Image (cartoon, helix red, strand yellow):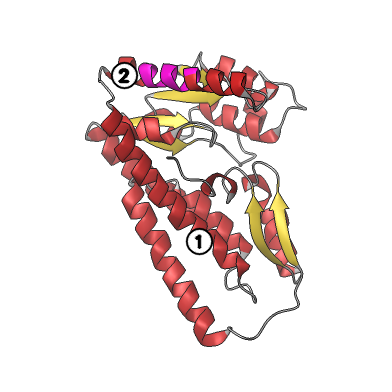
Amino acid sequence: YGDARRAGFMRLKEAKENGARVVGVYCSFVPHELILAAGASAVPLCATSEEPIAAAEADLPRNLCPLIKASYGFAKTDTCPYFYFSDFIVGETTCDGKKKMFELLNDIKETYVLQLPSSRNAAALELWKKELIAFKEKLESFYHITITDDDIRQAIRRKNRERKVMKTFFELGTLNPAPISGYELSTRTDSSGFELNIDKRCEAIEERIAQVQADWEANYKGKPSNKPRILVTGCPFGGVRDKIVKTVEELGADVVAFDSCSGVREKIELVD
């Protein structure tokens, strides 16, 4: 994960020097299809390091979620290249802590906030539709472009391909014995976000899927394991990967599924 993050820094720097458009995001609720349709790349900004938390606590309550404090701390101390190279930031109203963070982030770099509906009904759908149209118009005005319906269709096809590939990757966990550690499922998923090119991102995961499936067929098929099979749920889980996922597997269980924002949840349904 660390190697992928550092390599992503250099690719992003080179891309920006060549005029690339980059939008910083924190959440899977942000519609990447619209960012792609604008000819831009979405880069992940959620932070899981404790290093910048002390700086963040000068502005944020100490009892606030450490994910929020870490994310804000990197922005405040200007120590995250992904934040630095982003043209602007897109936030979303997933919790009160993040809403406060986005208010403060806007003093550092322009931050656009999507208002998420809090229910699932016709009124909520209409609200969310209006939010997506407003975000499309924000991208158009910011970059001085026009996003066409065809631009959006092409972006949807590219993201749907990625969803299919990642869903297949997560479905490796359905095999018994588990052919791949939950630790690798998690790290490869998160680190793939540091590759700006979706096609290259998909190709790398497809290559790993083929390797794992071939190894399982040759060495493990027909030899089921009685290890406990663990589902990790909750959003997000990057900060507990080493503390919990790795430890659980070292103690003899298999983490085989992630029900989370960066897990299989967002990959199940394709966009029409």
The amino acid type of the residue labelled 1 equals Phe
Kindly identify which residue carries mark 1.
Answer: 169
Magenta-colored span: 130-138
Name which quarter of the figure residue 52 lies in. Answer: top right
Kindly identify which residue carries mark 2.
Answer: 140
Tally of marks: 2
Answer yes or no: is residue 111 visible: yes
The amino acid type of the residue labelled 2 equals Glu
For residue 134: magenta? yes
For residue 182: magenta? no
Q: Position of residue 257 (x, y in %)?
A: 65, 58
Q: Position of residue 186 (x, y in %)?
A: 58, 55
SS of the residue under disc 2? helix
SS of the residue under disc 1? helix
Answer yes or no: is residue 112 visible: no
Q: Is residue 17 left or right of residue 225?
A: left
For the point 64% across and 77% down, the residue is 177
For the point 45% across and 40% down, the residue is 271
